[in-house]
Amino acid sequence: MTDSTITTLQVDGMTCEHCVASVTEELLEVDGVDSVEVDLNPGGASTVSIATSAPVEPESLRAAVDEAGYQLSGR
């Protein structure tokens, strides 16, 4: 069994469950991503926890968030 690594991102602009679904769907398409959990914070930065079983480039995760129409906090 492969150990998972958890990466946590802060994502701005998410306000509803549709936002959560969009970000989750895009992140799950990144090779190596096993699961995604979102702690929605409407009006603020939402916490997105990504479990991976293989190395994943941070740029790939950022690009997936961008593709969903959102951005990481602080950029």
Image: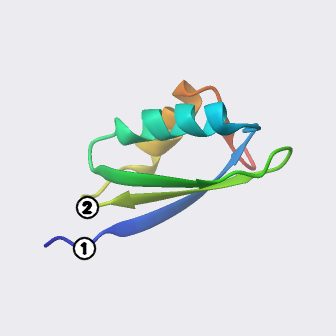
Residue 16 percent across, percent down from the top left: 72, 37
Q: Residue most toward the right? A: 43
Left or right: 11 with respect to 27? right
Q: In which image quadrant can residue 2 be found?
A: bottom left
Residue 72 percent across, percent down from the top left: 66, 44
Residue of label 2: 53
In this orientation, which residue lies closer to the viewer: 50 or 17?
17
Number of marks in picture: 2
- Residue at 44 percent across and 40 percent down: it is 27
Residue 32 percent across, percent down from the top left: 27, 50
Residue 69 lies, with reference to residue 43, above or below; the image says above
Task: Report if the CB atoms under discs 1 and 2 are less than 8 Å apart.
Answer: yes
Q: In which image quadrant can residue 8 be found?
A: bottom right
- Residue at 37 percent across and 41 percent down: it is 28
Q: Secondary structure at mark 2?
A: loop
Amino acid type assigned to the residue bearing label 2 in the image: Ser
Quadrant holding the N terminus: bottom left
Q: Which mark is residue 3?
A: 1
Q: CA distance from mark 1 to mark 2?
A: 6 Å
Q: Which mark is residue 66?
A: none
Left or right: 33 with respect to 63? left
In this orientation, which residue lies closer to the viewer: 21 or 32?
21
